[in-house]
Amino acid sequence: MSHDKLLSAIASKGADIDRWTKNATVPPTWDARNQLMASFVAPGSSVVDVGAGAMSLKGYLPAGCTYQPVDVVQGAPETRIVNFNTRVVPTFDQKFDVAVCSGVMEYVLDPGFFIDTVRSWADRIVLSYVTTDIVADAKRRLDSGWVSKLSIVDLDELFSNAGLSYRIRARWQAHLIYDLRAR
């Protein structure tokens, strides 16, 4: 998809809905990233899966975890709809132990709004992100549909402004896996 088409799709719908509708029904190519991120979740945790897609994360969670999928498309009846780019976000009656955000923030126009929203849902966030330090090529980022362009320094500032401390737990391909908690 060209840069102009991508931005047009996002402007009209808030997200590339066609891409995410397809991804909600097939096993993701990034399944190993979901498996790695699930390994950072404690047994018995309540988990909100932000950008759940085909919900493969659920199968990797430790015993006793409860699971709430959230996505821009209705992949399953229990999926709560969110569109961070149009600021359509669900509310929950509970606060979750962990929010897992596997490959989501790259597609969000306002990462500050995204972090603030997800932080309101969970006490801890396990998040992957491909920084511009790792993939700087603007064309490659746009070809992937990524609209946010943050460096490690930008993320440090974003997390700090949100009152979060973090550590980088792992790297999966070009994705850094962050563990975020309130300071």
Image: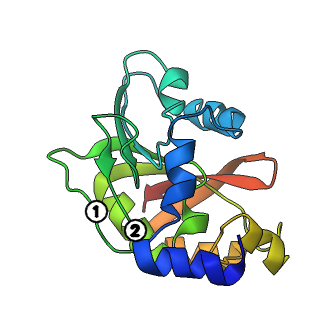
- Quarter holding the C terminus? bottom left
Q: Where's residue 78, x and y in %?
A: 28, 35
Please name the residue that numbered disc 1 is placed on: 89
- Quadrant of residue 155 in the image? bottom right
- Between 144 and 42, which is closer to the camera in this rendering? 144
Residue 26 located left or right of residue 89: right
Outermost residue on the top side: it is 63
Residue 180, compared with residue 143, is above or below; it is: above
Residue 113, compared with residue 79, is above or below; it is: below
Residue 150, compared with residue 119, is above or below; it is: below
Outermost residue on the bottom side: it is 4
Residue 21, compared with residue 146, is above or below; it is: above
Separation of marks 2 and 1 at Cα, in angstroms = 7 Å
The answer to whether residue 157 shows anywhere in this view is: yes
Callout 2 crowding tier (Cα within 10 Å): few <14, some 14–19, many ≥20 = many
Whichever of labels 2 and 1 marks the residue nearer the N terminus, that label is 2
**Label 2 element class:** loop
Q: How is the image coloured?
A: rainbow
Residue 58 located left or right of residue 1: left
Please count the marks in the image.
2
- Residues tagged 2 and 1 counted as in contact (Cβ below 8 A): yes
The kind of residue on which mark 1 rests is: Val
Q: Give me the residue at 43% from left, 72% from top.
A: 14
Q: Give me the residue at 82% from left, 68% from top.
A: 135
The kind of residue on which mark 2 rests is: Phe
Please name the residue that numbered disc 2 is placed on: 84
Q: Where's residue 147, x and y in %?
A: 62, 75
**Label 1 element class:** loop
